[in-house]
Structure formats: structure tokens, C-alpha cells
Amino acid sequence: MKHLILSTLVVSSALLANTEVDTLSEAFSEGKASGNIKYYYIQTDKDKSYTNGKNTSGYANTVGGQLHFDSASLYGFRTGVSFMTTNPFLLGSSVDASIIGRDNGVRIEGSPSGAVARKGFSVLGEAYLAYDYKNAGVYIGRKVIHTPLVNAKTVRLLPSAVEGASAHYDLAKKTNVTLSYYTGFKQRTSNVFTNIVKHALGNQTKTITGSDSGSLEILSFTHKADAYSLKAYDYYSKNFLNSIYLDGSYKLNLSDAKVAFSGQYINQKSIGNADTYFGNNPTIAGGKISVNAVGLKAVASMKSSKFVLAYSKVLKENNKHDSLVLAWDGTPLFTNMITSNDLFSSNYGKSLGSDSIYIGGSQGIKLAYNQKYDSFGLNGFSTTLSYLNTSNSRFNKDQNDYNIVLQYKTPKAFVLQLKGIWAQNNTGASADGTISQLKLLSQYRVIANYKF
């Protein structure tokens, strides 16, 4: 808690301008400080028949957040840092470590649910130097990023972050080309930046790729116009994996409503040493990685209401690893839910596992309804109801997810969320494709977030 108190004092004395300056001292004195303080409670219950009658209830309380500082620009140069912390309290004997140190526990062999996973931490999650010139810019260091397959995953307490370098060029105001090179990754429940490939494959990294480390290069193209947008990403990791992500959307403004239609396509293939290894050892991952997935989405917004219909399909390929590999907190499918989101495949060494809609052969249909109550005099209040059906010929029964979110949001700084999550026949696939199903998973969350 002392870190939070210190952070708040620093923020209260910081200036909030962010401009081009002439001296080094002005670059810091004219910098911008911001951050958030978040309280998070989570409780997860699993059907006891799955564990021979043993108690499966786990919960956690934690208070944490972030403190950011971005300097002003000096001759095009600027720097930024982000301090992140989580401080659990009032823990019971059975802990849900997914908002504390779960990745720390998994990363240290033999203690996935031990003291390491229960322990809070602090970390310098961002620390970078950037240079901007006209329509171009570069940065080097640690950074929180948001892309379809490498994402900050901000639905939990702290974001994930990467370490490396990136360069971008803006073609006019609506088109961007970015080339990035990353060697490190910090998962949201860890204070350690590990090699980005080793984080994905864990202790099998050298066996699979021929080296104990590696890198990830990302080439992206994005274009956003008034009525439509396009995205294209290529994620390349030598001797491991190549992933292509494409999506596009088109918007229509009707008399009483706004309607948007979107489509997406994902292709993943193992390459180099990994492709050879998986081909010669199919029991490790079910075969060579070969994934094709598509998604469609329609969104209709009318005054204070929003309706979402989404569809996804991960194509089935026999004798192949046909489930999506999401090693770095990406949850890209339009049908993604709070529960069905491959949350733990981004833990250390777990990338070849998968769940629900991301398993090869899965078809997902999602319905969602969001209602704001400002017109009824309840300013800031809203509810979101979501339902997902996931079917797959490999499942004994369909998975059905039900989510409800009650939210109160002030115009600027504060958000309170109450979340209820129920998943029937919650389904997971191991690296080799073996399917397991849990009869019922229930989860409850209370999240209070204040931004400054």
C-alpha cells in the first residue's frame, strides 16, 4: 500500500501539460502524469462433481493500479514510464490468483498455487524512449500495446507489456504502417519480463525451436475512414509460428440507428524447427500448427441501446494442431466472452492449450445487449447481458456462457462494475487436443476503478 500512497503524492504535484519544450528540465517539469487505482474482488466456484466433492471455491481481494509519467517532447524526443502494483489482502486458504501472481506461480516450477502465486508485486511495466518526426516515429524499451494477438488484456488488474522496439509511419491521417521487434513479454500476473518465445513455450522452448530464446516481429497496416476500417497484421516468430490477422468493418447511419458490420480471418502455421518438431512428434501438440478461423459481427445502436450478434468458426483439421495459439494475451474472436477467452493460455509455457471458441472445430454464436439508463434519470448506470453458445463435434455437450455486467460510471474518473459469470460445460483442450469439460463454472467480480 505504501507504493500507492507514494504514487498519489507524486501525481498530485505533477503538471498536466504535454508540449514541445526547449530544455531538458522543461521536458520533465512540463510532462504529464496520470494513472489509476483499482480495487478488484473475484470469486470462482467449480462444480464439486468435477473434483470428487472437494471444495473448489477460491477468491481474492486486491488493491493496485498504475502511475504513468510521459515527458514533454524535446527536439522530437520523449520518454515514458509506468509503475504497476498489486497488493492482495484478506486472502483465504483457497485463492483465485488470476488477479495477483498466477503467472509468477506457473513460471516457477512446482508452485502454481503456492506462495509465489498469492504474493503481490510491483514492477516498472513501461520504460521507453521515443522519437517523433513529422509522420514517423520510433520507440525502444518496455511498452503496453494493443493488437489482436498481442494485447494488454486490461480486463484484469494490470496490463501485459512487451519489451523491444517499434517504428511507425502515418500515410495521411487515417493510414498507419508499423514494424515492431519484441524480445520480452510480461504477463499481467507477473513482474518479470521473460523472453517472448520462452514465455509461450516454457521449458520446451529449446527442444521445439532449437534455441532457448527468440523474437516476435509484427508488421501491421491499419486504415480508418469515416464509414469503414481495415486492419492487417503479420506476426512472425522464427522457428516457431507465423500468424496473419485480417479484419474490416463498415458503418451505416440510418434515421434512428447506427449499424456496423465486421468480418475477420485468422491464419496460423508453425514454421521452421517448430514445424519439423511437431510433425515428427504429433503427440506433443497434436501435429503441426495449422489454424484457420473466421468471424462475423453485426452491431446496432439505437439511442441508449446496443445489440450485438457475432459468429465465429475455427476450422477443424485432422492430424493437425488446429486450435488458436494465443501466447500473449490476445483474445481476437468477435465471439469472445468474459469467461471464454483463453485467459490462461497466455501463462508461462501454456500457449498450446486452448478453450471453448478457440478450439479447432468450434463454432460460436454470441448475443449481447447493452442498455444505458441516462434517459430514465439514472445517469451513468448501464447493464450488459451476453450469451454464447459454443458447439463442437469433439465436445460431449455444448458450452453455454451467460454473463451479466452492472455498471456505474461517472463522466470522467470513476467506474464500478458488478459481474456475474456462469459457464455450463466449460471446455478446455490440452496441447495435444485432449478435451475436458467442467459441468459448471461460476464467477463473481466486483471492480472499482478510479482514474486520475
Image (spheres, rainbow, N blue to C red):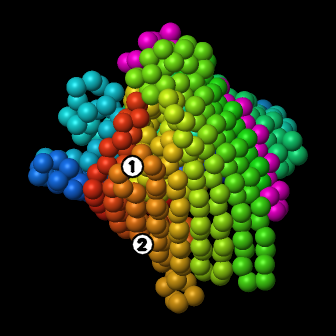
Residue under the image location 37 percent in, 18 percent down: 203
What kind of element bears circle 1? Answer: loop
Q: In front: 98, or 133?
A: 98
Q: Does the magenta stretch include residue 235?
A: no
Q: How crowded is mark 2: few (under 14 residues within 10 Å), some or many (20 or more)?
A: some
Amino acid type at image mark 1: Phe
Q: Residues within 10 Å of mark 1 (few under 14, many from 20)?
A: some
Distance from disc 1 to disc 2, alpha carbons, whole Å, reads 32 Å
Which label sits on residue 395?
1
Left/right placement of residue 86 relative to residue 376 reads left
Left/right placement of residue 438 relative to residue 146 reads left
Residue under the image location 80 percent in, 48 percent down: 223
Task: Give above or below for 379 relative to 192.
Answer: below
Horizontal and vertical percent position of residue 357: 48, 50
Horizontal and vertical percent position of residue 123: 41, 34
The magenta segment is 202-228
- Residue 283's image quarter? top left
Horizontal and vertical percent position of residue 368: 53, 69
Q: Which of marks 1 and 2 is in front?
A: 1
Left/right placement of residue 284 relative to residue 332 reads left
Residue under the image location 35 percent in, 51 percent down: 396
Asked whether the beta carbons under mark 1 and mark 2 sit within 8 Å of each other, the answer is no
Q: Circle 2 is placed at which residue position? A: 406
